[in-house]
Image (cartoon, rainbow, N blue to C red):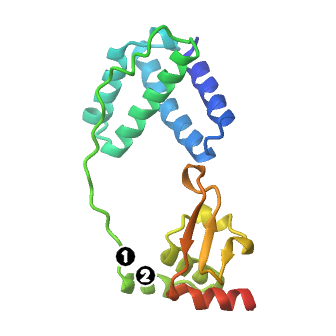
Amino acid sequence: MLFSETAEKFYDYMASIERSPRTIEVYTRDLGYIRRYLEERKNGPVYIEDVTQEDLEAFMRNVKEVKQYSPNTRSNYFYALRSLYAFAYKKGLVERNIAASMDFMRMPKKERNYLTKKEVEATIDCIHSPLIGLIARFLFNTGLRISECLNLTLDDVDLGKRSIHVRQGKGRKDRMVPINNNIYGLLLDYREN
């Protein structure tokens, strides 16, 4: 079976188990890049059963040494390969999972940089729309992802209990987020006006 056909089956499978559209989009992009590399290496269309562990390792060396991609990007490629081959093996599309024996890619720990209160205020001061300014303050004060904020309804925000019910957040998990004093009054005003 062509590598591209296997990848298509993998995308369909991810959709059937309700992986997020963003996850599928990233895997599609990354596996497309890997497929193009393999086609160039093999000088033509690539069948998944003809790809060797050496081919996969050569790809990983190429993105590190030649392309000099960041560790994060290389990690994405590594996990895309691992996931595709685990799927292909599980579905009987390959006789063995050649990606399973690839060495685990260690990611360097990097320290997170947070905005200071002054930087947050300077950012919000540049926003001319009152509604967008409120949304920015809301995001800064709650830590919600933009997609989580966009999916909220008024029923999800309980001002009496000072809590927000985030439904189907990252990993399709629900969670409760407290409403702090910095945003409470602004949300009251928003609801009433």
Spot occupied by residue 73 in the image (x, y as percentages of width and height): 38, 42
Would residue 50 be found to the left or right of residue 5 on screen? left
Number of residues whose C-alpha sits closer than 10 Å to that of mark 1, classed few (under 14), some (14–19) or many (20 or more): few
Q: Residue at x 65, y 60 (%)?
A: 167
Q: Residue at x 55, y 70 (%)?
A: 177
| Picture layout, residue 165 above or below residue 122 | above
Spot occupied by residue 172 in the image (x, y as percentages of width and height): 60, 50
Q: Residue at x 37, y 76 (%)?
A: 115
Q: Mark 2 = which residue?
A: 120
Q: Classify residue 129 by image quadrant.
A: bottom right
What secondary structure is marked by label 1? loop
Q: Classify residue 170 by image quadrant.
A: bottom right
Instruction: Check the picture and name the quadrant holding the N terminus.
Output: top right
Nearer to me, 90 or 88: 90
Check whether the beta carbons of the residues at disc 2 and disc 1 lie within 8 A of each other: yes
- Kind of residue at badge 1: Leu
Instruction: Check the picture and name the quadrant holding the C terminus.
Output: bottom right
Would residue 33 be found to the left or right of residue 10 on screen? left
Spot occupied by residue 8 in the image (x, y as percentages of width and height): 63, 26
Number of residues whose C-alpha sits closer than 10 Å to that of mark 2, classed few (under 14), some (14–19) or many (20 or more): some
| Picture layout, residue 148 above or below residue 67 | below
Q: Mark 1 = which residue?
A: 115
| Picture layout, residue 115 above or below residue 13 | below
Question: Which of the labelled discs sits on residue 52, or is there none?
Answer: none
Spot occupied by residue 58 in the image (x, y as percentages of width and height): 31, 22
| Picture layout, residue 45 above or below residue 175 | above
